[in-house]
Structures are given as structure tokens and as C-alpha cells.
Amino acid sequence: MSREVRVAVFRPDDERLRDAVELLDSLGATPVPDPMLAVEPTGAVPRDDADYAILTSKTGVELVADAGWAPGETALCAIGDSTAEVMRERGYAVGLVPDEFSSIGLVEALRDRVPGARVEVARSDHGSVVLTDGLEAAGGYVHETVLYELVRPPGSGESAERAASGELEAALFTSSLTVEHFLGAAAERGFRDEAIAGLNDAVVGAIGEPTRETAERFGITVDVVPEAADFEELACAVVEAAAPTYHE
């Protein structure tokens, strides 16, 4: 690598952050771990009398499994392969994973199945209305259960301080909420505008279009959006863009 690449990563402080740090280390970058999301369970569990139940995250699966939730005859849907994998590990049969791992992809996959059906959506308090509104528009009777709230951890914001000081070469945003919490942490420390300017001098990656749109709405220029909403693909592309490998 031709220069040091300090990369801010905002994943929750669990194995996702540890795996991200390990990946960035393997790419020759210097990780700047700064968790911007923490999970606060609500204690709620999904209904067990729906025709379809949708789980949108690994965290949600673990919470319902730990609570002993049994879906009965409900057909289970996962928003992507990683969620589906955890569902199977926890003993749930996965009936549907959309080709496109997104709310839009789920709506398209279920559009012809949900008219007149009861659809349970179990997720965080920051779930997109694209999913619930889309399923209702398709004719489903939608009920949403908030399994957990996503909050900004106390003390977060080291990455914002580094960005404001010009000490970041890259940043990896994995959701709209990580963007919002990054800016909240920067504002709390009194240098929101400087942090945005610092990011705009760095290489910024967003895991998908909704995250990119959120960042750009706040004045953050996004340089990299991977074809697949995959963290490893995002990290590799951003590190390569921040410090290209030159071949003679």
C-alpha cells in the first residue's frame, strides 16, 4: 500500500466490528473503530398467527430465538442470505429470500403472494416504510413488531474528530442511521461542518443507495457504492479507492 489508509468503521460493538477490524487489517488499512449503533431490546415478540413473517436482521433473529418464539405454520422470510443463515442456525425454516436483498426486493418477491394475507414484520425501530407500505399496497394486512431500538452509544465520535482534523482517509457507512449518528456525534463535539469537510476530502463508501442518499442529503459526497450490499465488498472497494495498488 502506497500510504497509510485510516478507515472509520461504524458497526455495532460485537463480532461485526471485530470482523470489520480484522478485514481492514488484512487489506493493509488502519481501522478506526467507532461504533455508531447499539441495540436496546424492547422485549416484544412477533405474532405467531400470521401467514408470513419477515425478519430483517441477524439481531432480530437472535432476539426472537432467545425469547423462544415459535412461528407455527407461518412462512418465514429473510431479507438476505446472512439473516437467513442465522435463522437456519437457530432452527427456523426459511421459506423465502429475495433476489435483491432490500425492502424493495422483499416487496417484489411477495407481491403476488400477500393479497389478503396477514404479514408480520419484525425489526428495529428504524425500519424503512418502503417495506410495510409496499406490502400494504400489494394487498397484505401488515402488522409490525419493534424488536429493538437502535441508539447511538455514549462516547461515540472519535471518527468525527479525526475527520474534522483531516486524519481519515476513508469511512464506511453501512446504514442511513450510521450517517445520522456520525453527524450527531460530530455536532455534540462542536465540529459538524468540519467533520463533513473532512469526509469530503476522504473516500466515503455507502453500502447501498438509501445510505448514499442519506449521506448526500447532509452534504457528504459518496465515492463508492458496491454492486451488492455486502460489507466486505464495500471495504475492499473503498480501501482500493483510497490507496490504489500500482502495478509496474
Image (cartoon, helix red, strand yellow):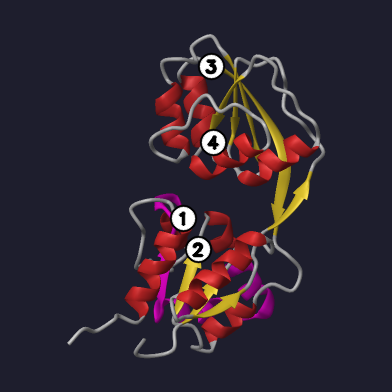
Q: Earlier in the sequence, mark 2 or mark 1?
A: 2
User: Which one is nearer the viewer's eye here, 25 or 3?
Assistant: 25
**Tag count in the figure?**
4
Please give the label number shown on residue 173: 2
Query: Would residue 126 be seen by someone viewing this image from the given angle?
Result: no
Real-space Cα distance between discs 1 and 3? Answer: 27 Å
Mark 1 is surrounded, within 10 Å at the Cα level, by few (under 14), some (14 to 19) or many (20 or more) other residues, namely many
Say whether residue 188 is magenta. Answer: yes
Please give the label number shown on residue 140: 3
Q: Earlier in the sequence, mark 2 or mark 4?
A: 4
Mark 3 is surrounded, within 10 Å at the Cα level, by few (under 14), some (14 to 19) or many (20 or more) other residues, namely many
Residues drawn in magenta:
181-210
Nearer mark to the viewer, of 3 and 4: 3
Please give the label number shown on residue 211: 1
Q: Earlier in the sequence, mark 4 or mark 1?
A: 4
Q: Are marks 2 and 1 in contact (CB under 8 Å)?
A: yes
Q: Earlier in the sequence, mark 1 or mark 3?
A: 3
Q: Are marks 1 and 3 in contact (CB under 8 Å)?
A: no
User: Please, what is the three-letter code of the amino acid marked with disc 2?
Assistant: Phe
What residue appears at the point 60 percent right and 83 percent down from the top-left corner? 161
Q: Earlier in the sequence, mark 2 or mark 3?
A: 3
Q: Is residue 222 above or below residue 146?
A: below
